[in-house]
Image (tube, rainbow, N blue to C red):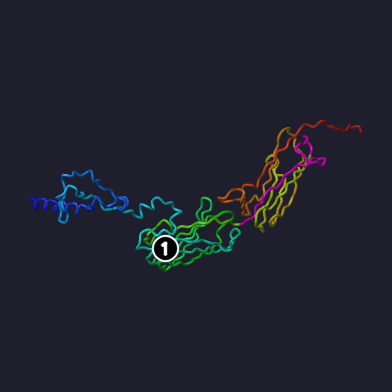
Amino acid sequence: MKNTQKIIAMLVLVAMVASGFSLLPTTQSKKSMPEGIMAVPNNSLENTGYLHTDGIDCASVEEPVPELYMEPTVDVSYAEISNELTDSAYEGITGIGGAPDLVVKSISVSPSDPTAYQTITIYATIINYGDVTASGFSVEFKSQYGTANISLGTVWVDNLEPEASTTVYKTTNKLGPGYHIINVVADSANGIPESNEKNNVKSMTQWFKAPDLVVESTWIVDTYGSTTTTITSGQPFKVYTKVKNAGDASTSATFYTKLYVDGQLYGTKTTSGLSVGSSFSFYASVPYVSEVGSHTVRVVVDTTYAVSEANKATGTYIGTGESNNAPTITFQVVKAKWTVLMYYDGDN
């Protein structure tokens, strides 16, 4: 009978080991078990049914019952971890091994404070964080300008060994006034299988200096030489305006400024070039306005868009300065208090 019990116990033991179970004495402290392991408590086993194995004396009921627990089988993959990361956190994370991992480490522009359409050089440093050489890949340079995407060309890199870096560059004069978001893409053709495909792009925002032609002020002078916003019906007056280059770059272009009263053109000023901070004034004579009520004066500077402009105050997306070139003011016309009538007698 005792031999039969031993055989049964050995068969049970073999089955448990094959299923991933191990046997430990109940005298083992639970604190010493690996974290995350689930054990079967002692009181879940009946004292009358012991597992009999060689080396374990089952004759005494005082003998501890073996405790069962599962071996740890937790396997946390890189994919499970990376799913919780935002795109900005991918730089420097190499992911799975056995592949290159190309990262755009930095971008710079020379000169660092360019003007619109100036010839510049964009530098980008590429590093291979992987453990395999990247053999032959392209690096693309481009600029986002408002809703437009401007391609600046690509550069070819023959190979890049693990932990090595290289600096590539592109020269261009395509970038106009205001803000540009410059993007550099490593392995732009997706020709290199990488351990992490989500860290190949880096961006920087660059301001390109430009003129900003603004109508600084507009005012009306009546027939008596007084500045006013009220004109008497039938009397002549003059409209003055002052235009300034409020940008951070000069212009050498020839541009036109036009002055309108109630939509009718009364004066044009031609200007050839205007340096940063400089201004000019001019006026137009208006013979009279008869209709009583509200009227408008509109001044438009650079009517043919000869000057490429930028203005940081208009926002950080493009920064175009073309939205502040045509302000409108209003003035009032009132009835005359008296009228002089003159006639000639044919006899005199």
Displayed quadrant of residue 286: top right
Residue placed most toward the observer, 84 or 242: 84
Give the residue at the far left of this rendering: 1
Eyeballing the image, is 340 above or below 115?
above
Give the residue at the far right of this rendering: 348
Eyeballing the image, is 130 above or below 64?
below
Q: Is residue 297 left or right of residue 167?
A: right
Badge 1 element: loop
Q: Is residue 83 left or right of residue 234?
A: left
Label 1 sits on residue: 129
Residue placed most toward the observer, 186 or 253: 186
Displayed quadrant of residue 342: top right
Q: Find residue 325 and report its horizontal and vertical position in percent.
A: 65, 48
What crowding class fits label 1: few (fewer than 14 Cα within 10 Å), some (14-19), or many (20 or more)? many
Look at the image and say whether residue 198 sits in the magenta stretch: no
Look at the image and say whether residue 231 sits in the magenta stretch: yes
Q: Is residue 168 left or right of residue 42?
A: right
Q: Is residue 66 left or right of residue 90?
A: left
The span picked out in magenta is 209-235
Badge 1 amino acid: Tyr
What residue is drawn where x is 51% and y is 50%?
Answer: 147
